Every structure is written in C-alpha cells, then in structure tokens.
C-alpha cells in the first residue's frame, strides 16, 4: 500500500464546547467537513494523540469520535498507516434558490403573488384589528378542562377520528347557531376547521377551477381573496354602499362562480348587508348556480338593534356556505373554526380535510365542547361583548373632535373595529405614519382595496381602528399620544 502524502489538515473553526459531549461534537465537525469537501478523500488525519493535543481534549474522546466516523464509513484505517478520509461521492451544495426556480409552476407563481404579510407577534396594542379582548379569556377554567380531558382520555378518542370533527362539538355548535344566530343546521353538515381561514381555503380548493371568477368585497378581507387567487380564480372586486355589497354589479362579472362576503359586519367598513340585498344575492346564486361564502367572523358582537339572520338561515336553495370562528371569541391562536355546509357538499369537504390533515387535534375540540356544554362559553360571550362595548365607548368618547382631513367617527353597532374616512390618500398616510411613530397601531383603509379598483385613489382613504384588543386605560393613553403626534389641541 503506497503512502499518501500527509495533506494539510485545517482545524480552524472547530470549537468544542466543554460539557456538551465533546466526542459527539468532534464527530459532527469532522463529518460536516468530509461531506462538504473541506476534507477531501485521501486526506490523512493526524494521529489521535496529536489531534487530542491540538484540540486540548483527551485522546479517549478523539478515539471515540474517530471510531464513530470509521463505523459509518467516513474514514478508513490503513494498517500501520493511520486514518484517512474515505473517498466519497460528495454531494454538491445546491445552487442558491432564485425566484424563478422556486416559483416554477403556475400554482407556485400564484403563491408568490398572493401571500399573507405576517401579523405582529408582540402583545396587542391599541388599535390592533382582528383581535378580541383576549386578556379576559378564562384561562384557569380552560386549563382545568384541558387537565381533566388529558388526565384520563377515553381511549376510543385517541385514534383517528372523524375528519369532519368531534361529534359532540358539532352538536353543540348546531345548538349554539340555532339559539344565537337563528341558523337551523344539522351537525352532520358541520365541519370543524383550523379557523375561518382554513374554511375559506377549503371553499377555494373545492369549488373553484383555475380561471373561474370569484367576486369579493372591495375593500375587503385580503386573506380570503388570496386563498381564491391561489386556487386559480380571477378575483373581481365588487363595490359597496351603505347597504353593503352592490349585488347588481354581479351581472357584470361574466361566469362568476362564487361570492365571498362578510354580511353581518362588512370587513373592514362595518356596513351590514341589507335584507333586500341578501334576498337579491340568494336570487343571484339560484339563477346562476353560484356559491355564496358567508364569513360571519364577528357576528356575536352586536351592541344595539336586532342582528339580521345570516344568509345561510334564509337560504332555501342550498347555495350558502357559512363560515364561523372561535378566534374572535376566544383568541386567534386557538385555531378553531367551522363550516356549515349544504348537505351536498358536507362529505366532500370532510374528505378533502382528511387528505390535508386527517382532522383537527382532539384536545382543543373536546375541551371547547366541554367549555360550551358547561355554560362557560355563553358567559364568556356576554363578558366579551360587554368588554368590547366598553372599549368602543371609550374610543368614541376620547377620540379628538376635529382632526383635519378626518371625518368624525361613525356610530358603531357591531364588531371589533371601526372605519373612518379620510379626505385623501396623502392625509391617510400622514396620519398612519405619525401614529405608528408614536407607538400606536394604525391601519389605512387604502390597503384593503383590490389593486384594480375603479374607485378614485382619494376615495379609498380612511383609518381602520380595532377597539377591543386592549383595556380602556391603554385606549386613553393611545389617544393622548395621537393628540401629540397629530399636533391637536390637548
Ligand atoms: C373577515 C375575517 N374573516 C376571517 C378571519 C380569520 O379568522 P380565523 O383566525 O378564524 O382564521 C379574520 C381575521 O381577522 C377576518 O377579519
């Protein structure tokens, strides 16, 4: 056997941390260098005594690392001649992904154009939108119910469950919807989802063919539009007025297959869809064979007047898909929502969900079922409604009277946020950026319109303020900071 020349052996970059398995660290460092080619095949490793000295560790440790490399074939011993790096077919590092090769297929390209901006991860501040008063959630009760469930779960519930979700929870949701929302439904047609977003996304996956047209409110809930666009839909914005979605505009959208909307409390303008418009929309669905996706994301928050029955409660043709969420009553990270489906669709939705994820995790479903059955849910809804109303009142009371270029706040009868018009886009951006600089969260209405909206730029301006996320003192403090930032009389 010929002696290979002793090749240079570079130990730079090997920093072993005492007390954390020195042999394992050395093994990993050497293996990494062999795999990425820094140690080429045929390189002779220093003798174990020498290596131990260079690294300041015991010879025993080095021997253990080398034994492992030897056992796995990374190094080979030559009798009487030391240890050599094995000749391996090296894996070349992949070229850095470029946008063109990552987003090669049409589906991936659509995803590149329609993704969600990650929301802020810090604790809520005034005036965050989309979150309820989750500081009031009864965590102790929830923890107790969780502990009770997991202490001795029925074994039958620990295998794969029904893809449509936990039966007891579906029964309780059906009872709740009947009593609270006037919606008669059969638990067999309810599918439990990971929040409203998954429910909307399932509609997009199952009811849309690439190229189909889908109508959404503009301004509206962007995440829903994205879900339909990623499924290949051509998303068309429909304007609103003080009765909500202008249903007659659907005639102008040839081949429209589906309408997504938030009729109880339009997101983000807060308009309620009038009864004549509801009936006109149902008529459209019947005539065109179209689907209506009704997102009732914050329907529980009504402060005055009687809520209108959901579209699903008026639907005689089985064209409405009702989307509900626990995210606005408990907290968004719970990721629990549901669909109430026409009987003809319930099986398909459950099957699709089974392929995606089998079903939602059992613990949260079972605990929510117990939370409802024991009466905590109803109590919590009352508490949340009261808190949201008090926080709304504080905002309405504290908000400055005359902000140049900003309309007075509207009356707010429902929901967790309000929307106020601003005279121009430039003024909106000025108000938003100075508010943010003062540590107050603020969203411009202009960000909620579809890009192809025909509405003039300045008519799209406004502010969207979530009022439920934080207690009254924080609302008062935020308004105070706004007065200073916006240079208003204090
Ligand atoms: C209109 C609307 N629909 C649905 C959702 C999402 O609900 P979930 O958290 O249950 O996915 C939101 C969240 O803010 C929303 O504003």
Image: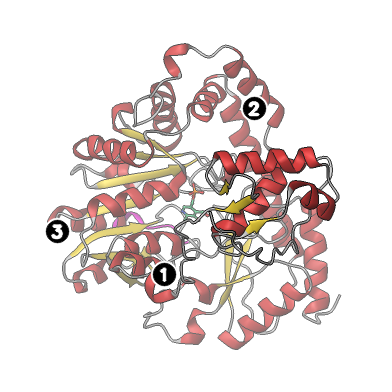
Residue 486 in sight from this viewpoint: yes
Name which residue lies at 83% across and 42% down.
58
Residue displayed at 69% across by 67% down:
8
**What number is the disc on residue 288?**
3
Depth-wise, is mark 1 or mark 3 nearer the camera? 1
The quadrant holding residue 194 is top left
Task: Report if the CB atoms under discs 1 and 2 are less than 8 Å apart.
Answer: no
Q: Describe residue 344's horizontal placement relative to residue 194 as left or right.
A: left
Residue bearing the label numbered 2: 142
Q: Residue furthest front?
A: 1
Mark nearer the viewer, 1 or 2:
1
Q: Which residue is mark 1?
A: 112
The residue shown at (76%, 58%) is 475
Q: Which residues are magenta?
A: 271-276
Location of residue 18 (image quadrant) = top right
Q: Measuring 45% from the left and 30% from the top, which residue is drawn there?
A: 176
Q: Secondary structure at mark 1?
A: helix
Q: CA distance from mark 1 to mark 2?
A: 39 Å
Location of residue 430 in the rendering, given as x and y in whole percent from the top left corner:
67, 84
Task: In this rendered view, identify the residue nearer to me: 293 or 20.
Answer: 20
- The quadrant in which residue 254 appears is bottom left
Specify which label sits upstream in the sequence, 1 or 2: 1
Q: Check residue 272 for magenta coloring.
A: yes
In the image, residue 21 sits, relative to residue 294, either above or below, namely above
- Does the beta carbon at disc 2 come under 8 Å from ligand 1? no
In the rendered view, tell whether residue 29 sits above or below residue 376.
below
């Amino acid at each position: 056997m010929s002696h290979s020349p002793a090749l240079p052996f570079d130990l730079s970059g090997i920093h072993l941390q005492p007390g954390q398995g020195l042999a394992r660290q050395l093994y990993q460092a050497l293996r990494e260098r062999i795999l990425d080619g820094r140690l080429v095949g045929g390189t002779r490793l220093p003798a174990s005594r020498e290596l131990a000295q260079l690294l300041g560790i015991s010879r025993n440790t080095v021997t253990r690392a080398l034994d492992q490399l030897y056992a796995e074939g990374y190094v080979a011993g030559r009798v009487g001649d030391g240890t050599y790096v094995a000749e391996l077919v090296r894996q070349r590092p992949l070229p850095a992904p470029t946008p063109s090769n990552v987003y090669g297929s049409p589906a991936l390209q659509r995803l590149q154009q329609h993704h969600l901006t990650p929301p802020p991860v810090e604790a809520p501040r005034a005036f965050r939108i989309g979150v309820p008063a989750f500081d009031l959630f009864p965590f102790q009760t929830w923890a107790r119910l969780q502990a009770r469930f997991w202490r001795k779960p029925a074994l039958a519930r620990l295998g794969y469950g029904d893809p449509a979700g936990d039966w007891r929870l579906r029964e309780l949701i059906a009872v709740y919807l009947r009593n609270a929302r006037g919606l008669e439904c059969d638990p067999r047609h309810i599918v439990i989802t990971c929040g409203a977003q998954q429910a909307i996304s399932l509609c997009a996956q199952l009811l849309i063919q690439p190229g189909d047209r889908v109508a959404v409110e503009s301004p509206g809930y962007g995440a829903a539009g994205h879900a339909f666009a990623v499924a290949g839909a051509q998303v068309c914005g429909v304007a609103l007025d003080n009765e909500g979605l202008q249903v007659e505009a659907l005639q102008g959208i040839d081949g429209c297959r589906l309408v997504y909307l938030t009729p109880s409390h339009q997101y983000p303008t807060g308009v309620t869809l009038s009864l004549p418009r509801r009936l006109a929309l149902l008529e459209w669905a019947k005539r065109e064979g179209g689907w209506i996706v009704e997102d009732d994301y914050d329907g529980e928050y009504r402060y005055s007047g009687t809520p209108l029955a959901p579209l699903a409660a008026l639907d005689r043709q089985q064209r409405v898909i009702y989307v509900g969420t626990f995210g606005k009553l408990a907290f968004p990270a719970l990721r629990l929502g549901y669909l109430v489906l026409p009987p003809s669709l319930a099986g398909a939705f459950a099957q699709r969900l089974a392929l995606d994820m089998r079903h939602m995790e059992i613990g949260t479903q079972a605990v929510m079922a117990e939370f409802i059955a024991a009466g905590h849910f109803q109590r919590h809804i009352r508490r949340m409604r009261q808190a949201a109303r008090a926080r709304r009142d504080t905002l309405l009371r504290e908000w400055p009277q005359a902000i140049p270029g900003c309309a007075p706040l509207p009356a707010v009868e429902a929901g967790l946020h309000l929307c106020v018009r601003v005279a121009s886009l430039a003024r909106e951006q000025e108000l938003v950026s100075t508010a943010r600089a003062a540590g107050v969260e603020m969203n411009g209405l202009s960000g909620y319109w579809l890009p192809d909206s025909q509405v003039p730029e300045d008519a799209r301006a406004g502010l969207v303020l979530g009022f439920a996320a934080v207690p009254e003192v924080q609302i008062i403090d935020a308004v105070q900071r706004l007065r200073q930032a916006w240079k208003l009389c204090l």
